[in-house]
Amino acid sequence: MLQSKPKLQIQGGGFRNLTDYEIRDAELWVEATGATASCSYISPQGFFGTTFPLRSCQQLPVVVTWIYRGKPCKSGPFVFPMLEPVPDEPVLAVVRFHADGTTTAEFIPVSKIPPRYLR
């Protein structure tokens, strides 16, 4: 009998600022559903995280917009890379902002996120 693959469970999202400047008005938008996550200010080298009720990952394209050094920026649409193997615990979908104006994105198991970031 074939066993189904475990589904990735998302428990929240986060924005990680890897620059030496503030990030303003960061927003992640899921095109297919219209769902958004946003943060008006992320300090230099800072993190913003939020949790929500568990949901199964659907691998839907997202668009990220933000303001960096006074300039509007946009990334996407893109799909978060899938974790292999799928962890036994929920993950946060984290977008990282880089000094060259680009982003990277990954799913991070909740146990690897410092609790102070999830207040």
Image: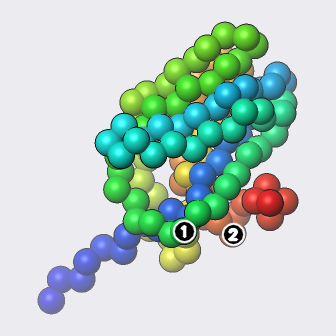
- Report the side of 33 relative to 54 (left or right): left
Q: Between 84 and 80, which is closer to the camera in this rendering? A: 80
Mark 1 or 2, closer to the camera: 1
Residue 106 at x, y percent in the picture: 54, 47
Residue 99 at x, y percent in the picture: 71, 21
Q: Between 59 and 72, which is closer to the camera in this rendering? A: 72
Direction left: furthest residue: 1
Residue at image coords 41%, 53%: 82
Helix, strand or loop at mark 2: helix
- Amino acid residing under circle 2: Ser
Identify the residue position indicated by label 2 in the image: 111
Rendering quarter of residue 5: bottom left
Residue at image coords 51%, 62%: 10
Rendering quarter of residue 17: top right
Rendering quarter of residue 56: bottom left
Direction bottom: furthest residue: 1
- Amino acid residing under circle 1: Pro
Q: Along the polypeptide, which appears first: circle 1 or circle 2?
A: 1
- Report the side of 86 relative to 90 (left or right): left
Q: Is residue 101 above or below residue 53?
A: above
In whole angstroms, how far apart are the C-alphas of marks 1 and 2? 16 Å
Q: Is residue 36 in view?
A: yes
Few, some or many residues within 10 Å of mark 1 (<14, 14–19, 20+): few
Residue at image coords 80%, 25%: 22
Q: Is residue 79 in view?
A: no
Residue 53: image tag: 1
Q: Are marks 1 and 2 in contact (CB under 8 Å)?
A: no
- Quarter of the image that includes the C terminus: bottom right
Residue at image coords 45%, 46%: 35
Residue 13: image tag: none
Residue 100 at x, y percent in the picture: 66, 17
